Image (tube, rainbow, N blue to C red):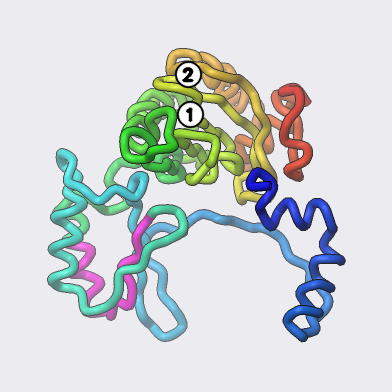
Amino acid sequence: NRKHARLKYTIEDRGVDWFRAEVERRANVRFEPARPFAFTGNGDVYGWQRDDRGRWHYTLFVENGRIRDTGPRQLLGGLRAIAAEHDGLFRLTGNQNLVISEVGDAGKGRIDDLLERHGIANESGASALRRHSMACVGLPTCGLAMAESERYLPALIDRLEALVAGRGLRDVPITIRMTGCPNGCARPYIAEIGLVGKGPGRYNLYLGAGFSGERLNAPYRENIDEAEIVAELEPLIDAFAAGRRADEHFGDFLVREGFVRRVDTGREFHGSAAA
């Protein structure tokens, strides 16, 4: 049954204890008891970070993973210039960004200069909402896609940036992810704002996931276009700006205020939109 051929379904059907015992039996290993854990974040830490060896690493925002020159933001040319100077590594992140890695003290200043010269430093204008966005390639690249994604999300964020900026939320991180079909290659179901392609120019809207990926979002509206997406989000952003608690994330606020129900497991995903 191809629709049921995923490890998550096996664990859902049989349980964690059965799965653990089966792996131990087949691999002839013995697992230690599970240790406590907590999700504290699944995003990238932008900018310079120094490791315990004294080497520097710069995580660079790359919108939707696409490296190209667009107007004043010369990402392709800038990275080409950095590659000519840099003797370390380039690393890709799980959030479509890039790490300029293994930089010495002497090289850090030169890379800073090249980032600024090509308009690609993280401080060059991208809002927190944009820096926490992600999209799959969508139409026309993917044969499974039913809607635009990578090429369209930046334009939608242009409109949403105006909403959050006008309410003093420009620097408040909100995760937003878009895919061209329900396969969800950009992980929209753990975004505070998730958009999944339904047809050309139309999307299902999902809201209320945990900022750190510890909770799923819930279906909120189905088969809506850009005007309807903005109309649905505007009053929620207004309410968030007026009623959020200190350091409260957008998804947590929506759940707390009852705009969407809390979804902790996959079996709870489909249901009514209200809490």
Q: Name the residue under label 1.
A: 197
Question: Is label 2 in a helix, a strand or a loop?
Answer: helix
State whether residue 170 appears in this view.
no
> What crowding class fits label 1: few (fewer than 14 Cα within 10 Å), some (14-19), or many (20 or more)?
many
Question: Is label 1 in a helix, a strand or a loop?
Answer: strand
Where 63 sits versus 14, above or below?
Answer: above
Rendered-image quadrant of the C terminus? top right
Q: In which quarter of the image is residue 92?
A: bottom left
Q: How many marks on residues?
A: 2
Q: At 39% across and 37% down in the image, what residue appears?
A: 138
Q: Mark 2 points at which residue?
A: 230
Asked whether 120 falls inside the magenta stretch, the response is no
If you read the primary sequence from the N terminus, does the residue marked by circle 2 or circle 1 appear first?
A: 1
Name the one closer to the observer, 77 or 245: 77
- Dot 1 amino acid type: Gly
Residues in magenta, as a range: 97-113
Where 267 sits versus 113, above or below?
Answer: above
- Dot 2 amino acid type: Val
State whether residue 67 appears in this view.
yes
Tell me where residue 134 appears, x and y as whole percent: 44, 43
Tell me where residue 114 appears, x and y as whole percent: 17, 61
Tell me where residue 73 appears, x and y as whole percent: 20, 45
Q: At 13% across and 55% down in the image, what residue appears?
A: 77
Q: Is residue 111 left or right of residue 11?
A: left
What's the distance in space between the residues labelled 2 and 1, CA to CA? 16 Å
